[in-house]
Image (cartoon, rainbow, N blue to C red):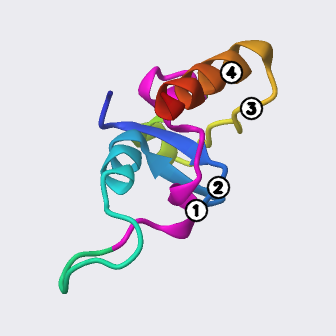
Amino acid sequence: MSKELMFFCIPQEAYMRTDNCQKLRKRPTGKVPAGAQPKLRACEGCTMFPLVDKLKVPTVSLADYLGGRRPEVANLRSASNRKLIQAHLEREAS
């Protein structure tokens, strides 16, 4: 996963770096020890992870983002994206 790519996170309704997405999903959910930050509520039920990991979301470089260019919003309803999300959900259920 490239650290210098920006994408639009649909659950958070914000632009985010791909490496931040990975860091946020590793956080614990619910109650956490003092000093630790819990996973954001938007991240708890997110299904975009497999798309971000495989770079199937529209991205722009960090330099382009800082220059004013914004990535498009991923189409979660496209056949290929639905297939990746479904495969991810099935692996989690197993």
Q: What is the secondary structure assignment of the residue under circle 1?
A: helix
Magenta stretch holds residue 42:
yes
- Farthest residue to the bottom: give it: 34
| 17 sits to left or right of 88 | left
Q: CA distance from mark 2 to mark 1?
A: 5 Å
Q: Which residue is mark 2?
A: 11
Q: CA distance from mark 3 to mark 2?
A: 12 Å
| 83 sits to left or right of 45 | right
Q: What is the secondary structure assignment of the residue under circle 2?
A: loop
Tell me the kind of residue under disc 4.
Asn
Q: Earlier in the sequence, mark 3 or mark 1?
A: 1
The 10 Å Cα crowd at callout 3, few under 14, some 14 to 19, many 20 or more, is some
Q: Which residue is mark 4?
A: 81
Residue, x 46% and y 20% (percent of image)?
54
Residue 77 at least partly seen: yes
The 10 Å Cα crowd at callout 1, few under 14, some 14 to 19, many 20 or more, is few
Q: Which residue is mark 1?
A: 42
Q: Which residue is mark 3?
A: 76
| 24 sits to left or right of 90 | left
Q: Position of residue 28 (x, y in %)?
A: 32, 63
